[in-house]
Amino acid sequence: MQPHLIKHIWNLIKEPLDGWLMLFLGLIFLLSLMVLYSASNQSFGKIDNKIVYTMLSLLIMWTISRTRPQLLMHLAPPVYGIGLLLLIAVHFKGVTVNGSTRWLSLGVTRVQPSEILKIALPMMLAWFFQKYETQLRWWHYAVASVLIALPVALILKQPDLGTATLIMAAGFFVLFFAGLSWKIIIGGLVAFSASLPVIWSMMHDYQKKRVLTLFDPMQDPLGAGYHIIQSMIAIGSGGPWGKGWLKGTQTHLDYIPERTTDFIFAVFSEEFGMIGNIILVVLYLLVISRGLMITARAQTLYGRLMAGSITLSFFVYAFVNMGMVSGILPVVGVPLPFVSYGGTATVTLFISMGMLMGIANLRK
């Protein structure tokens, strides 16, 4: 193959991609392979699956990054509608696992429709505000709130508090960047605080137990408090420098539950210590900073709303998972972005990064 042809192909591949984002995501991916290999008892099975899902996700991300945001914007209403229909289908034909009905069976695999709404909801809201950009009134925000409430209510019914919280946060960030008044935001916070007793009475027993366990995990050390206690022991025992790769005792003696998915941060902390945590947090902050730069430079309202929602939702992902594993937030089942094992979540995250790069390309 001629050198100029190789150079042409390379330029074609890298043209739509954001170099800084790819660098930060690549470093996070390398760290994720190391910690996943250790968390899975040095099994290559999960590593192979993660690499396959990541390669597929990168291809999808590259395709989306080459797609003009205006085209994706016009797809928002049908994608949002399909997502709602799939959530309704979950209610009637869903697969139940560990007491939660969140999946639809497609024969060879299962899909989690709520993951679609993590992208579809902000797309729908951004399309809505772009359409009425020059004539926004208070009722537009009221309609947007209904668009948020519909999928959130369906997901809470599954029940899946973690995903519902993330989707609600993504919707709120669109409202915020669309110019929602601070008076309304503060009023909403006050109303939310006042409604906490009502919300508490509507929560499932296991959800109430998770909240109470947050304040005193030792009240049920072998039950509801087990996850938090073991993860806090792992994080604390890591110390400044960690016990070393593949040398985590809490991990390899099977004390940490869900250690390849929701609690993989505990494995990482035990083996790489505070220094490793700082490196990972810095990488996340760099991704967020780059996303905010793209948000500030977006050429359209749709681009600004989508980029801002994607970026701050990514922050919420990381913050909630780390806070959950560290014992400062209730356990709600949120994966650590780009590190936890999981195919659907990986694809969703890379799709959002592809959209972010597409918005950046519009400026170029």
Image (spheres, grey):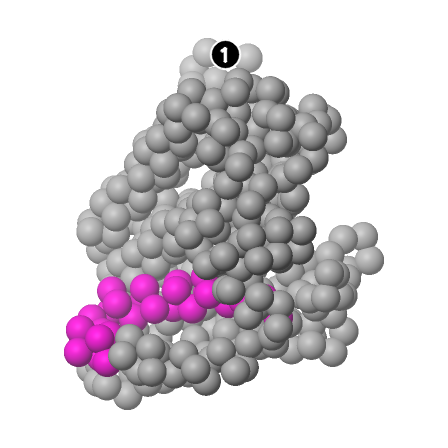
Is 246 in front, or is 215? Answer: 215
Q: Residue at x 41, y 60 (%)?
A: 71
Give the vertical position of 241 relative to 78 (above or below). Answer: above
Is 9 in front, or is 256? Answer: 256
With 289 as the anchor, is 155 left or right in this view? right
**Could you tell me residue 206's position as x and y percent?**
62, 68
Residue 121's quadrant in the figure?
Answer: bottom left
Is 41 in front, or is 307? Answer: 41
Q: Is residue 324 magenta?
A: no
Q: Residue furthest bottom?
A: 139
Q: Residue at x 57, y 58 (%)?
A: 219
Give the vertical position of 240 relative to 339 (above or below). Answer: above
Q: Residue at x 30, y 36 (%)?
A: 286
Which quadrant is home to the N terminus? Answer: top right
**Could you tell me residue 253's position as x and y percent?**
69, 30
Q: Give the structural element (helix, strand or loop) at label 1.
A: loop
Q: Residue at x 50, y 41 (%)?
A: 232
**Could you tell me residue 231's position as x and y percent?**
55, 41
Q: Main secondary structure of the magenta part?
A: helix
Which quadrant is home to the C terminus? Answer: top left
**Could you tell me residue 285's position as x and y percent?**
31, 39
The residue tagged 1 is 2
Q: Residue furthest front?
A: 219
Q: Which residues are magenta?
A: 159-187
Can residue 59 be seen by looking at this rendering?
no
Number of residues whose C-alpha sits closer than 10 Å to that of mark 1, classed few (under 14), some (14–19) or many (20 or more) = few
Q: Is residue 167 magenta?
A: yes
How many dots with numbers? 1
With 320 as the anchor, is 218 left or right in this view? right
Can residue 152 be seen by looking at this rendering?
yes
Q: Amino acid at mark 1?
A: Gln
Give the vertical position of 110 relative to 61 (above or below). Answer: below
